[in-house]
Image: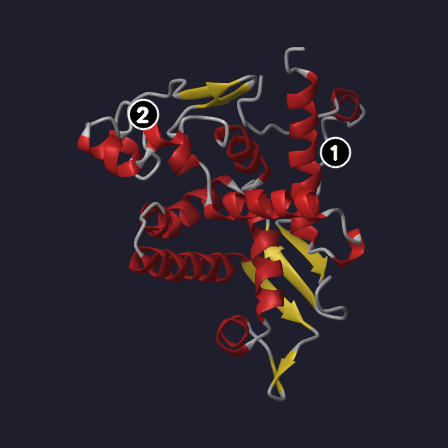
């Protein structure tokens, strides 16, 4: 059963091989060579207890607002959600980007401000993805939930109906302050997928978009995988695996 928790595996034998008086070296940053712009190198922070708290304080309110507006049906809601999402990504870069090398913008060495204001967008998105990967913020879990939620009665989980019925606390809406969300509990489940909050707020707009792209890819046939964006290729593998499991578990 998938509960969407993450854990680090430790090799006990490796620990046993170290003497008690041997210190362990740890790098608090990660050095990455850009794939979108070969020759560019950047360094991002590894996650730590203190850094996680600091980042959470910075992005919590904006993230909740962005997801709240994303659930709206009006064009203004979608525009506001897009703006807030970009502001959150800018916070990730300011928080996590330690060093940027090999890039000049308008003849000057690029820094964080230059990257955000005048730099190549594809590089900025790559850096955001690298920082989120260090944070353990994987889209794969939300993508799996999005796949299974498409088979549910989604009309029963619309935000306006839920709020009018006073169900947002019982369903542990992800857009509520965590202090008001109540104790963790199973809110929605299908097959071996379990979510401890409202699936509407758990699933991101990115997951929905990737799921739609997957259906288009299946409908019109496979194209050259080397021409597809990396994020879409990853999504295709994840969703295809879920789809095969769905078919194998279907009753005859």
Q: Quadrant of the C terminus?
A: top right
Measuring 76% from the left and 58% from the top, which residue is drawn there? Answer: 227
Q: Position of residue 198 (x, y in %)?
A: 37, 30
Residue, far bottom: 107
Residue 22 image label: 1
Measuring 51% from the left and 44% from the top, which residue is drawn there? Answer: 208
Decide which of 167, 46 is in the foreground and name it. 167
- The Cα–Cα distance between marks 1 and 2, rounded to whole angstroms, is 49 Å
Decide which of 203, 225 is in the foreground and name it. 225
Residue 171 image label: 2
Q: Residues within 10 Å of mark 2 (few under 14, many from 20)?
A: many
- Left or right, residue 101 beside residue 58: right
| Precedes in sequence: disc 1 or disc 2 | 1
- Left or right, residue 226 beside residue 187: right
**117 shown above or below 130:** below
Q: Can I make out residue 176 in this image? A: no
How many numbered circles does the render carry?
A: 2
């Amino acid at each position: 059963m998938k509960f969407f928790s993450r854990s680090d595996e430790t090799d006990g034998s490796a620990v046993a091989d170290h003497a008690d008086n041997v210190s362990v070296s740890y790098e608090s940053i990660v050095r990455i060579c850009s794939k979108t712009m070969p020759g560019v190198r950047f360094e991002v922070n590894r996650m730590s207890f203190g850094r996680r708290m600091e980042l959470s304080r910075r992005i919590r309110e904006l993230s909740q607002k962005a997801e709240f507006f994303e659930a709206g049906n009006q064009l203004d809601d979608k525009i506001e959600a897009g703006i807030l999402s970009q502001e959150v990504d800018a916070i990730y870069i300011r928080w996590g980007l330690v060093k940027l090398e090999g890039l000049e913008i308008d003849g000057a060495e690029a820094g964080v401000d230059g990257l955000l204001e005048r730099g190549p967008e594809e590089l900025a998105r790559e850096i955001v993805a690298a920082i989120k990967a260090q944070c353990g913020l994987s889209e794969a879990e939300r993508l799996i939930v999005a796949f299974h939620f498409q088979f549910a009665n989604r009309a029963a989980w619309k935000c306006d109906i839920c709020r009018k019925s006073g169900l947002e606390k019982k369903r542990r809406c992800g857009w509520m302050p965590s202090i008001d969300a109540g104790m963790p509990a199973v809110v929605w489940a299908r097959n071996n997928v379990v979510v401890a909050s409202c699936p509407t707020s758990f699933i991101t707009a990115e997951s929905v978009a990737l799921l739609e792209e997957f259906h288009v890819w299946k409908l019109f046939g496979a194209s050259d995988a080397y021409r597809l964006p990396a994020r879409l290729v990853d999504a295709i593998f994840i969703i295809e695996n879920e789809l095969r499991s769905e078919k194998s578990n279907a009753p005859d």
